[in-house]
Image (cartoon, rainbow, N blue to C red):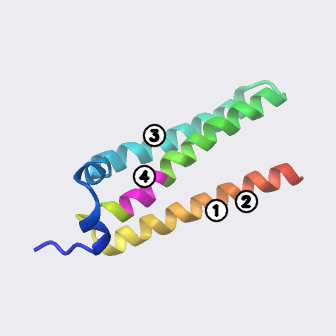
Amino acid sequence: MERRGKLQQQMSPSISKLFSETSIAIGVVLGILLMWIASMIVILGETGRTVYKASSVVSSLGTLFLTVMLVGGGIANARIERTVRVGMVIMGVILLVGFSLTSVLSVLF
């Protein structure tokens, strides 16, 4: 029998389908791909402010996909083992905090 917490019992089936194992994997791969493209923009692009702005936007989108899929999947998907779900939420929070600190520090210095 599947154990479900109060939060999973209150979620609609559409949210549970949104964070299935397949969609989590696709979201994580898409997030990593966008972050890789952002680094390629910086490496291969000419120096200038526009290159760094474009790279920042693409990297932000990648981090958004990664964070949403990790945290959302960790909370909404009850079919994944509990320790894996906790790890997903922790990694999503670490990504969010790390990316936020990097953005703030780049503006300050």
Work out whether mark 4 precedes mark 2 in sequence or the reverse, and give the earlier one.
4
Cα separation between marks 2 and 3? 22 Å
Which amino acid is tagged 2?
Answer: Leu
Cα separation between marks 3 and 1? 20 Å
Q: Which quadrant would residue 73 be assigned to in this image?
A: bottom left
Q: Which quadrant would residue 56 be assigned to in this image?
A: top right
Q: Is mark 1 on a helix, strand or loop?
A: helix
Depth check: give the residue in front, 29 or 75.
75
According to the picture, the residue beneath numbered tag 2 turns out to be 101
Work out whether mark 2 precedes mark 3 in sequence or the reverse, and give the earlier one.
3
According to the picture, the residue beneath numbered tag 1 turns out to be 97
Which amino acid is tagged 4?
Answer: Met
- Magenta residue check for 35: no
- Magenta region, residue range: 68-74
According to the picture, the residue beneath numbered tag 4 turns out to be 69
Q: Does 50 sit above or below residue 79?
A: above
Residue sitting at 30 percent across and 51 percent down? Answer: 15
